[in-house]
Each structure stands twice: as C-alpha cells, then as structure tokens.
Amino acid sequence: MKIRCRVNGVSREVETPPMVRLLDMLRETLRLTGTKEGCGEGECGACTVLLNGQPVNSCLVPACHAEGASIVTVEGLSKRGKLSPLQEAFLHGGAQCGICTPGMLMAAQALLQENGAPKEAVIREALAGNLCRCTGYVKIVEAVREAAKVTRAAAAAKKPARKKKAAGKEKAGGKQKPAMKKAARKKPATSRGKRARRA
Amino acid sequence: MVTRSPAVNRPRSIGRSVPKKDAAAKVTGAALYVDDLSPEGLLHGATVRSEIPAGRITRIEFDSAFDWSQVTIVDHRDIPGNNCIALIEYDQPALVENEIRHADEPILLLAHPDREKLQQALRAVKVHCEPLEAVLTMERSIACARLVHATDNVQKRFLIQRGDLEAGFARAHKIVEREYRVGHQEHLYIENNGVIARMEADGSLVVEGSLQCPYYVHKALMHLMGLPAEKVRVVQTVTGGGFGGKEEYPSMISAHAALLARKSGRPVKLIYDRMEDIAATTKRHPAIVRHRSGVTEEGELVAQDIDVIMDGGAYVTLSPVVLSRGILHAGGPYRCPNVRITGRAVATNTPPNGAFRGFGAPQTLFAAELHMDHLAESLGMDPLEIRRRNLYRLGDVTPTGQVLRESVSASECLEKAVKVSGYVKRRKALDAANRKALARPAGKGPRKVRGIGLSLVHHGAGFTGSGEVKLASIASLDLSPEGRPRALAASTEIGQGTVTIFSQMIGDALQVSHDLVEVAQPDTLRVPNSGPTVASRTCMVVGGLLSQAAADMRARLLEFDPRGWSDDRSFRKLALRHLKERGALRIDRQYQPPSGIEWNDDTYTGDAYGVFAWACNVIEVEVDLDTGDARPVEVVTANDVGKAIHPRLAEGQIEGGVSQALGWAILEELRWKDGRVWNQQLTNYIIPTSMDCPPMKVIVVENPYSGGPFGAKGVGELPMDGPAPAVVAAVRHATGQWMDEIPISPERLLEKLARLEEALT
Amino acid sequence: MRAALSRLRVVREPNLAMTARALEESAEGPRPLVPMAGGTDLFVYLNAGALPEQDYLDLWHLDELRGVIDTPGGVRIHALETFANLRRDPLVKRRYPALAEASSWVGARQIQNRATIAGNIANGSPAGDSLPVLLALDARIRLVRFSAPRDVGFDTFYTGYRTSVRHPSELIHSILLPWPLPGTRQYFRKVGTRLAQAISKVVIATTITVQKGRVTRARIALGSVAATVVRVPSAEDALLGEKLTPAAASEAARRLRESIHPIDDIRSTAAHRLRVAGRLVELAVADALR
Ligand SMILES: Cc1cc2nc3c(=O)[nH]c(=O)nc-3n(C[C@H](O)[C@H](O)[C@H](O)COP(=O)(O)OP(=O)(O)OC[C@H]3O[C@@H](n4cnc5c(N)ncnc54)[C@H](O)[C@@H]3O)c2cc1C
Ligand code: FES
Ligand code: FES
C-alpha cells in the first residue's frame, strides 16, 4: 500500500504493507532509527512519536493510520542542527543510557505544546507512559521544567515592546508572564483524582 | 575556548557538572544502538528454548510442511570449541545437548533473512522432552529433593568468623532471631539484549552489541569458537541500560549469534524481544537471610549470627561472587566483636541469577537493617539511636578483621539525612496524625497513614579482596591522529557517564578541557582489558589508572617541549608535533594495589575492600489502609561517594538507584508458573512510572579516599542498598506491621492488616 | 513483533454504510473481518503473536463514528471517541464525571490518544476501566449492521468471559448514556498495579441517588472481580431505602463480599480483590455522603 504522509515536515510517499507497525515503517522503511522499541506492547513509550500532534505508541499504530497524517519523530525536534530547548535541557542528566530519551522527548514536547508552564504533578502524569529505568525521573522532570522556562523566556524576549513590564517582572521575581499564566491555566484535560461531583 | 594557565594545577572540570558528552547524540536520535544497525546481507537470529524447567530431550521435530531451505539451523554439534560459557566455572552450556536444567534454556538456533519467516520457523520446531522433577525453590534445593548440582546442591559456601559468639550472646540483654526474604528482580533496562555477529574473510569473528564487559564476551567466544584472542573482536555499541544485566548474559547471546554467523557465513542479528528477555536472562538473586543477634541493655551489639542463602539458579555463573559480596555486607555498617556469617548459594532449576546493581549486598543489607530495627524495638529504643550507638567509626574492625582506616562516613550520612528530613520531628508528627486516621471508622472515607523510616548502609568500593590484583587491569591513554588525548579502556558507557567522567579526569590531569579528550569506543581490538564495568569500579579504579596515565603523558610532553601548552589549541599543536617527530605516544597503566591492603581468600579475613562508601536513606511512605498500597512520598538520601567527579551524574546515579530499589521493595515481583516466568511482559512485571516515583532530596557527601582519583569511591551500586529497608521501616511506623519479606505487595500488606483488624473485632 | 504483519490485509471503505456492509458480507464467509479502531488492544495481541491470521476492517477514518452529542434521552458517545477526548469533553465532565475520571486512568497519555471506548467495550476485558462506569450509568449500546441497527442494554451485553451479544457482523456504533437522575452521586475508583499505565486489580463505579435523605436508586458495578464486569444487586439492595450511613455501607460491603467470586491471577489474588472490593463500596458510600 502506498502511504502519503508528512514526516518531520517533509512529504513522503511510503510503500508499505498496511498492518506493519508505524514503528517499523519509520525505523526500517524510512531508516529513522531514533524511535526505539522497548517492549512492543505499548507500555514503555520508547516508541512514542507525534501523530497529528498527539503522542502515540508507534508500536501499536498500523502504518495505514499514517495515511494523510503528520508525524514528528525525535529526528524532527532540532531545527537546522540546533537543538530545541527541550533537547538542550536533557543534556544535563535527563538522558542517561538514552534509550527512553527519544520517546520521553516526544511526550514532553506534546505536553509543552499544550501547557507552557506545567507543574511537577502535570509533568509526571504526562510522562507516565514513558518508562525510564536509569534516572528515577528526577532529572527528566527537571529538564522539562527547565525547557518550559527557557521557552517562556525566549517568547518573552521576542515581544519586548508590549510586554516589557511583564518581562521585567520575570527577571526580578522569576514570575511568569501573564499571558503564559493563562496558557498554563487552560488545561486540556481534567486532572485525575478530582472527585466525581454530584450531577 | 578560554582555558586557564597550566601553571596552576587546579581542577577545572572535576566537581563540575559539564554537559554529558554522549547526551547530544542521544537527544537527537543519532546515537546508534545495536538494533539500529543493519549491515548488508543481514540475517535475523532466534532461539528455540526449553518449555520445561527440567528434563531430557528425546527428539527434535522440524515441521516438514515448512520451507527450511533458507533457514540456518544450529545445535550443539555446530560448536567448534567447548560447549560452555566460560566464566567462573565452565558448567553452563551454550546450547543444551541433552539435559534441560531450567526453563527457557537455549537448545537450537535459527536464522533467516526475514524476521516474519523466522517467527514461523520458530513455531515449526518442536522439542520433545521427558520431564524430570524440577527443584524450584531454595528450600527444596537444600533438602536435596533432587540433586541438580554436585552432591549437595550447594554451588558455593562461605564462612566469616570473628570473636567468640557464645561469649557475645552471654553478654546480651536481648537476643532477637528472625528471617528475612527478598525476591527476584529483573533489571529491566529499556533496551533488550542484542548483538550482531559476523565472520571476517580471515576467519576472525566480530561481535558488536549491547554489553557491559567486552572482555567477558571475548573470553567466552574464544573458548566456544576455539579461536585465538586476536581472532575475536568484541565491540560495544551504545547501550540502553545494563545494571548488571548485561554483565555476563551477553556472552551467551554473543555465542549464539557467533554460531549462526559462522554457519551461515552472513552477519546475524540476535535481538531479544521483551518477553524473551524477561523469561530467559539473569535476575537478582532471591535470598533468605536469618539473623540471630544480641544487644546489651544500652543497645550495644555484642553478637551476630547470620546465615545467608541465595538462589543461584541452574548454573554457577557469577553466584559465588554475588554471595561473597552479600556475606561481606551481611552484618550491616555496625561494629560487633562477635560475628559468624555463613553463606550458601544453592542450585535450582531456574534460569541462573546473576549480576545486578549491588551484587548481593542489597539482599543482605535489607536483612541487616531490618534486624537493627527489630533489635531497637526489643529494647524500646528508637531506630535512630541504636544506629548511632553501633555504627562504624574510624578505627573500627569489620567481621573480616578489616580496620577502617579512612573515609568512614556512616555517622555523617546518618546525621545529614536525619537533619534534612527532619526525621525526629516528623516521626512524632506522623504518630499523632496516624492515631487520628486510624480512629476513623472504615465507612467514613479514605484512610491513609504515613510512616517514616531510615536505613544506614555501606558498600565496599571496587572488587572484593584480591579481585583487582588478580584482574591486573590496564588502561591506556594515547594521542589521536588529530592530536587529542584519547582514553583506551574496556569500561563501557551504559548511561552512567563513563565517557564524561573519564574526559573530566584526563582533561584536568593534562590541563586541557574535557571537550578535547576523546574516549575510544570499547573494542577489544583497540582497547586494553581494563576489566569489567561492574562493582562501581569504573570511576575509582579505571578512572584512577587513566588519571595516572594522563599525568605521565603530561610529563612526557613537557619533557618533549618544556614550554608546554596554555590551552587546547597549543596542546594539540604540541601533540601533533610530537606525533610527527617522535611518533605515537601511548601510556599504559596497570593496576597496582594500594599498599597495606591484605586479604586472605582462604580464611576470608583481611581487607575485603580498599574503602567503603556510605549512605543513609530516610523515606516517608503513605499506606492506603483500604487497598494496602504503600507509596513512597518523599526520599532523603545522603551518600558518601568520596568525591563527585560530576555532581549531576552522581545525583542521577543515586536517583536512579533509589527508584530501582523502591521498585524492588514495593512493586516488582517475578511470578512463576510451572517453573517458567509467568509475568514476562511490562504490563505484568511492574516497574515504577514517573507517577510512582517520589521527589528526592539527594545529599552528596564527599569524604575522600586516598586510593581513588580525586578521592572518588564510586556511586553506581550504593543507592540500591538502602531504600528497601527504609521503606519497610516506614511501613512499620505507619501501620505497626513488619514486612520481613519484599516486595511489600499490597496483597501481603492488606492481608496482614486485615488479619489484625479481624483479630481485634 | 511476532505476527507476520506484512501479510495482513486491511479493508478500508469510504463510509460507515459501506464499512458495515463489508463487515456483514464477510461475516457469512470463511474469513470474517475484524474491526480495528485505535489498535491498542489488537496490536498488543499481534505483537505477542497471540492472534490467528485474519483480515481487518479499518474504522479509524470514519468520522461518522466520532462525536459526543446531546440528545433528549441523554448523551450519545460515538464508538471512536478516545479516552483523551472523553476526559476533557465538557459535556462528559459535567454530566458523567465518573466517565471522565475513568478515562483519565486508562493507560497513560499515549494510550488515551488512541484507545477508543468501543474498543474497550468490544475487547471485553473484565478489567476494562470504562465498563463499570457504563454499567453504573445504565448505558445502552447501539450496534449496527448494514441491514439494521439495534440497541441493547449494557447490563445484558456480555454473555461470558470476552463474549457478548454482538454478532460478528455488527459494529458498535455508539453508547447512549441516559441523563443522570437529580441527586445522583457518581463515584469511580481504580485500584491498579501502579499509579499509571496500570491494569485494574479492582475497579468500581457507582451511582447513588438520594432523595429526601434516602437512597432511591443505586448501581454498584465492579471490574476485575469476575469473568465480566458485574453489577452487584444484593449490595445495591442493601442501600435502597436507607440513609447513607457507615452501617449501611458496611452492610452493602458485606453482601458484596458474599456475592462476588474473584480469582487469583497474574495481577492479584482472590482474597485481595474481595477485601478491596468491599472497601471500595464503603468508600463509594462515604463519598456520596459528602
Ligand atoms: C499499555 C496499555 C495500557 C492500557 N491500559 C488500559 C487501562 O488502563 N484501562 C483499560 O480499560 N484498558 C487499557 N488498555 C486496553 C486498551 O487500550 C483499551 O481496551 C482500548 O479501549 C481499546 O480500544 P482500541 O480502539 O484501541 O481497540 P482496538 O485494539 O482497535 O480493538 C479492540 C477490540 O475491539 C474491537 N472493536 C474495536 N472497535 C470496534 C467497534 N466499533 N465495533 C466492534 N468491534 C470493535 C476490535 O475488533 C478488537 O477486538 C491498555 C492497553 C495498552 C496497550
Ligand atoms: S515499544 Fe512501543 S511502547 Fe514500548
Ligand atoms: S535514560 Fe536509560 S532508560 Fe531512561
């Protein structure tokens, strides 16, 4: 079957049997070996890629579901050889053996796209589908928080004119920009454990 | 690049958390792990395994309906050398000839160019067996239900004795006797085991793969293939976690890939899937540890009688060494004049247990620490106080008669962790809160209680006793063609930071930046045998050799040109000039034992380790009384590592080790069914996710060791030792229940709590 | 990867009607098509080599099977709604908080993005986390085949371990959740093997309706304690007409423990399940009290 999709921003036409795993299509047909396999049962998250912007386990996705889709893998995170803030943040202990890192980065990237200032608990939940045996998750959570901070700072620096006051405030007290606060509040999903209410 | 003058020889990289050198390739997906390689003409390999734990093969049947023409088939008759995996003893076959001694034991090997066809081929083979009675537990092994090893099923025994046990017990005010149990643990590196093997035109064999100890594999392949050393080449690829699980097992999988490559004449990739990896490869040794010990009224430990039994599995593999480290730590970090420690590794019909972070010490320290708590309780003393009274101090003597001469930080670690965690206050506060929670009747909403527990542990740095001397490791430093200093060592980067730390040490000794330093890929053709990447010895021992080599290189270069260098550029210039005028520069450094260290292997007396590392863990746990779930909510962990060459990497080792230990203590349990591992998947072998791991406060204590580079003692294993007993102590504090067996599964804990409640009502 | 994935055939029709027809036609032949939604169950089985070679019928592209819509009789949730959607859908969050909560406990993010509610139902694992909620909410399942749709009550949907009244020629089209009665408290709790990416050892959903201080209706549904998700009428009866008191709760728990017979398996023990199930009923009642 011929599958048309965008992989890391590039349009591709891939000839592949339809039920082959997206993971194998990426690794074997397209030779994008950054995406890893740790279990083949959806548990470890090492194979996480973004499918239309959402993190999915590529070991559980048939190639035919990539038809017309946009896919981002770890290879697509850096732009023109420059590491993304998230990748940069992972250089300082977030990646030990590194086998979980590509999947972890993709899950974290998805989180940061929807929440510019995630709290620790939110980060931990967003990464709960990515097993890491090396780090105890401490430096990973730190890296995600750091990347969020760097990204916010960069965004603030880009719009100095209107938001000057806010940027100044950020410097002084390490507070977030108001605009970002709003983004942080706009949580896409109910957080778990909220008591079911009387309807 | 800005560099400081070489005139002042002060560390500029050591102690700083520079970016991890291998990380850039890992965050972009560029790092190539073994499964990312696909050489031309590749075949995929697979292993036909036993389905029963014990028996004899009667017949192997190949389905005639299947097209076998493209399948390479290997059995034991295809082995050119000895059918064994050479390790301590040569008892484990690479492929079963006749007798099956554990489930999932390799019998046949298959290779095919197509992975899907290979799977079909696997299903088209049927091994017929005549089952034998399987010995599946330590108890059955000791009872000699059937002999599976030698004349008594004992693979190894040890005895350590000091003082007069009877006299000690005579002095005791209280004597406490108890048994502790710990279960198997799977390493669960996220990258499964895998290698690629190929035969070169000159008849030499090349194996590359995910492994910790290239020279272990090298040795095993020489024996198996009947090849001389120079005809076997082992290369480590980027490795996705090891924790000991890729210490000895890669010899087996390499052997298999090599046999298939030899027979087919093609490169063969053998990668396990998760189920095969969990079912067939090594695990942490389960253990039964019995303590009988005596304390005086003041809480002084006066006698310890300890018996350690470990389940070695079906073959000897590394069990003697694991047991050795186990018994050497069995007394805990406490002074006791009268001690007897006996140890046995027993054989069962289960896959051999092997190296795993901590190497036997976590098992015995678990028992030792819990026993301290029991002793404290028998005296009505606080667990903190009994530790303060007995912990090792400078000049104390261990059960093997080792005098602790330096770098003893039991007290410092304990006090720091206690202070930072607010242990004393917190314990009282939780007592009050728990009384309230417990008073709440079941029907009134969720009931949760919290407890806080602590543990104190020590961990012998480097190999035991004469291990390092026997090994006589060599590490080298040379100049690369680009004029960079280049480390040549067989020590592998498995995520823990070897490459970065070596670069830092060498850079500082040569007074160049760590960025300039190259660390060669471990490849037995290129690097000398610096020993295995185990026992937290990489930084302390191999790093030490490399630092010395760097100092030598510096002297040699200064001799060549006394004007020296002021920065990386001038270093390279000088180095290139040296290469041109004098040729290659390579310094080999061989391990020399520090003076004054003596060990007797026969009597098990003397200096078991050059030095010990120390750690105290304080852990707060929340127990849900409705479900029995115990959840660590906060960890404070103080670890004396001598010197943190790279503080963030050291912290990362500690955080990772602690979470692995928390998994072992609470969640991780290997289940068996008919002698086979039942939970072979990640959906049923449960390791902690980011939601299950608590935040951690890591305190790095630096009490330098004179025999380690910059004072370093190693950090890899220490964090695995302490968390489990601290969790159990916390659960005891929270619920009043002693969980002398781990994992503390909710099933076990709730059962105990329910029994108690039923007894009360 | 143990199944020969490259040999598997997938049928993909442009719309629901043609998809239903393809399914119905194949059901009479030697190779009935197997519907495929998010694939999170199917691919686990395929990767483990646990399925016979069969042909698949893709549903993923059928937007007709997506949407959460307000109807006079309740809310209709279409088959392909993922748990990621259900946990954040405003309507679901407001009217069926137990379902939103359950959805947030399925696997982890990656799974929630692909796992569909119909897949959860059709897979029929007794540990399926949405199933007790659907039972407690009196859900009705709409099954379609090309010829005709039919609605069945979820309480009569399963006939045994992983078997149901759904004929191989039928697709799950949607789920109708009736409007909750006024004064109804919904409760959901999952006790899994760990805090995320976990399969339930016991999972409970309850709806308890209290009018004038007395329980007028109760649904107590449990997963992972029997071959299918179950309701426990005896425990429900214990609450009916009663005030919500700890005594009523413990009576319900007692009856529940008498009427369920969980088993030992790879994830937990019968004894543990029994104990925990009893406690969860008490917690559900305590929750309704608040
Ligand atoms: C790592 C992991 C974690 C998981 N965690 C959880 C969890 O916590 N809780 C939980 O409940 N489940 C869990 N699951 C199971 C799974 O995700 C759910 O059962 C999911 O809802 C299945 O939906 P799907 O769309 O992926 O189904 P698919 O895999 O596509 O299909 C599953 C079955 O349903 C059939 N089917 C699908 N759609 C239809 C339809 N419309 N009509 C008729 N038949 C249909 C298929 O033929 C197949 O038999 C987990 C799975 C994985 C891999
Ligand atoms: S390989 Fe896909 S989740 Fe593990
Ligand atoms: S860094 Fe090794 S598994 Fe995460």
Image (cartoon, coloured by chain):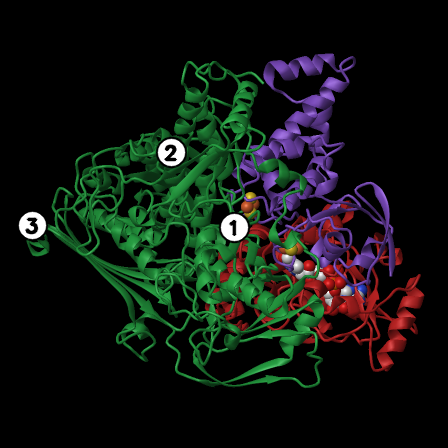
Colour chain B is painted in:
green
**Foreground: disc 3 or disc 2:** 3
Residue located beneath label 1 in the image: B688
The x, y position of residue B681, in whole percent, is: 57, 62
Q: Residue at x 77, y 59 (%)?
A: A62
Respond whether the residues carrying marks 3 and 1 are from the same subunit.
yes
Picture quadrant of residue B30: top right
In the image, residue A187 above or below residue B50: above
Q: Quadrant of ligand 1?
A: bottom right
Amino acid at the residue labelled 1 = Pro
Camera-nearest residue between C208 and C213: C208
In the image, residue B535 above or below residue B87: above
Camera-nearest residue between B123 and B583: B583
Q: Which mark is residue B421?
A: 2
Label 2 crowd bin: few (<14), some (14–19), many (20+), radius 10 Å: many
In the image, residue B753 above or below residue A108: below
Q: Chain in red?
A: C
Left or right: where C287 falls relative to B621 = right
Left or right: where B409 falls relative to C103 = left
* Callout 3: SS: helix
Amino acid at the residue labelled 2 = Ser
Residue located beneath label 3 in the image: B171
